[in-house]
């Protein structure tokens, strides 16, 4: 999501010059220039972004997210274009604070951005990062996280295992800064969107039992769902891979009611009367509303409350004893409080005011680092799902230009050709990463109760694993 200034040294017949002049590269550069503009950004909003995008983000949405990303990274520089066409450009960028970012921009024919995504990613592997054995990766990870924690840049828990045996596992910082209660490997930490994995698994369990089919329409199970287009045209597969046309539920109604939301029906009421952003199957857009509809279908088919179903059919058989969708007002679970940086800077502050009362089928539940290792074991030993349906669920359906893609609420990623399965999550005061490398046997869990503190660590660790000695065999 950042690009410096477009270099104007175009020579006829020069391949680089042709790329530099392409609409995709111009959009990439425009976004980087905008990113690096600081307080001057606002004057360029409508020049860089479409009116529809600005409207969807709300009056404060775009400035807020740009401030957050800039505070985390500083200025950015385009490193490499990964892929591009007439509607999208994806590229790797480096930041002055040492992070690496995947930037994904959709744009219109007039060169304005209609949607974007920015994610921390692994850095390009240096020669010294290649060929490490498991013990060396654990040692590097320990030193890396110890340094970040000492600098106040990480609070949470990190766990690296090989063949289900921990190589490195340590908690850092405070679960509650006021009482000085420390984080532990069993502390429940907010997962953000990582909870989508459990919703995807619940649907797949019901498919395996013959109670659902991925090609079922929403209306087959929710015949009274208000939006006719979604009801009649959207399938479970569309909802699972973000192709339904639904967006997010973080709208004005959510802001006004977040402390009283107690059920998936409450969440659905926030968006179910709104039009879709596109017809089901005709686009893709990361969605938090889609998993809520899936949760309603789980409730309808099973006759159980969504939260009870997840407890009984995922957490319990996996042995996940410190995982749940905890109410933000309860204080018996020992869950960690999230801490975020105020927009004006200064000391980290609690994110409790920003949280809804409870998370949904799209995210906002809690789990401990130890529990997520247990989840990885159960996912692959047959305790939760048979192998055939697990592979259907975790094999990508929406490809990414740089390899791998998005599956049924799971990431099916690639690093140096090595496959990992998992998901991440993030919000103010929340950042979580889970990755299991099924062929290599590594499981990586990084949970942070601090703004965007987990993803850079996970990106570095995944790079070491993807280029490890095990990967070279």
Image: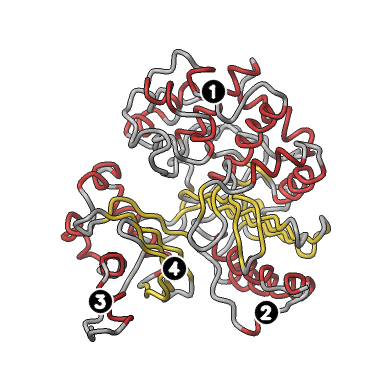
Residue topped by disc 1: 296
Q: Secondary structure at mark 3?
A: loop
Q: Identify which residue is drawn at 73% across, 52% down.
A: 185
Q: Nearer the viewer, mark 4 or mark 1?
A: 4
**The C terminus sits in image quarter:** bottom right
The residue tagged with tag 1: helix, strand or loop? Answer: helix
Q: Are marks 4 and 1 in contact (CB under 8 Å)?
A: no
Question: Which residue does the image show at 45% across and 39% down from the upper left?
Answer: 243
Mark nearest the camera among 4 and 3 is: 4
Q: Please report whichever mark, 3 or 1, sits nearer to the chain's N-terminal start.
A: 3
Give the quarter of the image for residue 13: bottom left
Work out whether residue 249 can be spotted. no
Q: Earlier in the sequence, mark 4 or mark 3?
A: 3
Find residue 130 and name its label.
2
Which label belongs to residue 82? Answer: 4
Where residue 384 appears, as percent x and y from the top left, is 76, 36
Question: Which of the marked residues, 4 or 1, is nearer the chain's N terminus?
Answer: 4
Q: How far is mark 4 from mark 2, CA to CA?
A: 22 Å
Mark 1 neighbour density, 10 Å: few (under 14) some (14–19) many (20 or more): many
* Residue 375 at x, y percent in the picture: 74, 44
Label 3 and label 1: CA atoms lie apart by 48 Å
* Residue at image location 26% in from the left, 76% down from the top: 5
Residue 139, image x, y percentages: 74, 74
Q: What quarter of the picture does the N terminus occupy?
A: bottom left
| Closer-to-camera residue (244/338) | 244
Q: Is residue 165 left or right of residue 182?
A: right
The part of the image, by quadrant, that contains residue 447 is bottom right
User: How would you rate the neighbour count of disc 4 (Cα within 10 Å): few for under 14, some for 14-19, many for 20 or more?
Assistant: some
Q: Marks 4 and 1, Cα distance to the nearest angstrom?
A: 38 Å
Mark 1–mark 2 Cα distance, whole angstroms, equals 46 Å
Q: Can residue 119 be seen here?
A: yes
């Amino acid at each position: 999501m950042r690009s410096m200034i477009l270099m104007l040294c175009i020579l006829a017949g020069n391949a680089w010059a042709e790329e530099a002049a392409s609409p995709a590269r111009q959009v990439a550069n425009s976004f980087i220039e905008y990113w690096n503009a600081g307080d001057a950004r606002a004057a360029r909003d409508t020049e860089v972004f479409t009116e529809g995008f600005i409207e969807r983000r709300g009056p404060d949405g775009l400035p807020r997210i740009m401030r957050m990303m800039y505070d985390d990274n500083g200025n950015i520089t385009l490193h490499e274009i990964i892929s591009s066409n007439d509607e999208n450009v994806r590229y790797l960028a480096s930041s002055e604070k040492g992070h690496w970012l995947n930037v994904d921009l959709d744009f219109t024919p007039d060169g304005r951005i209609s949607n974007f995504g920015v994610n921390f990613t692994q850095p390009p592997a240096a020669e010294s990062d290649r060929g490490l054995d498991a013990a060396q990766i654990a040692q590097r990870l320990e030193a890396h996280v110890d340094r970040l924690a000492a600098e106040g840049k990480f609070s949470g828990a990190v766990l690296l295992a090989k063949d289900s045996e921990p190589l490195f596992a340590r908690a850092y910082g405070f679960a509650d800064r006021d009482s000085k209660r420390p984080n532990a490997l069993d502390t429940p930490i907010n997962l953000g969107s990582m909870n989508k994995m459990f919703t995807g698994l619940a649907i797949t369990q019901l498919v395996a039992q013959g109670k659902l089919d991925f090609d079922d329409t929403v209306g087959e199970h929710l015949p009274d769902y208000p939006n006719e287009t979604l009801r009649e045209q959207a399938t479970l597969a569309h909802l699972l891979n973000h192709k339904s046309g639904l967006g997010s539920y973080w709208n004005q109604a959510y802001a006004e009611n977040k402390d009283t939301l107690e059920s998936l029906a409450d969440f659905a009421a926030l968006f179910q009367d709104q039009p879709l952003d596109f017809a089901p199957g005709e686009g893709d857009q990361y969605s938090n509303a889609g998993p809520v509809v899936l949760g309603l279908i789980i409730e309808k088919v099973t006759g159980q409350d969504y939260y009870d179903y997840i407890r009984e059919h995922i957490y319990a058989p996996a042995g996940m004893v410190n995982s749940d969708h905890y109410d933000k007002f309860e204080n018996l679970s020992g869950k960690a409080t999230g801490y975020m940086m105020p927009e004006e800077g200064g000391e980290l502050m609690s994110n409790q005011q920003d949280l809804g009362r409870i998370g949904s089928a799209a995210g906002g539940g809690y789990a401990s680092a130890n529990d997520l290792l247990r989840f990885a074991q159960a996912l692959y030993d047959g305790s939760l799902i048979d192998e055939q349906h697990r592979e259907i669920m975790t094999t990508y359906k929406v490809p990414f230009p740089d390899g791998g893609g998005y599956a049924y609420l799971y990431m099916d990623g690639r690093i140096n050709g090595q496959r990992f399965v998992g998901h991440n999550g993030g919000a103010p005061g929340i950042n979580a990463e889970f990755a299991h490398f099924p062929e290599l046997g590594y499981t990586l869990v990084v949970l942070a109760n601090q703004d965007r503190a987990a993803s850079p660590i996970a990106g570095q660790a995944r790079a070491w694993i993807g280029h490890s000695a095990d990967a070279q065999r």
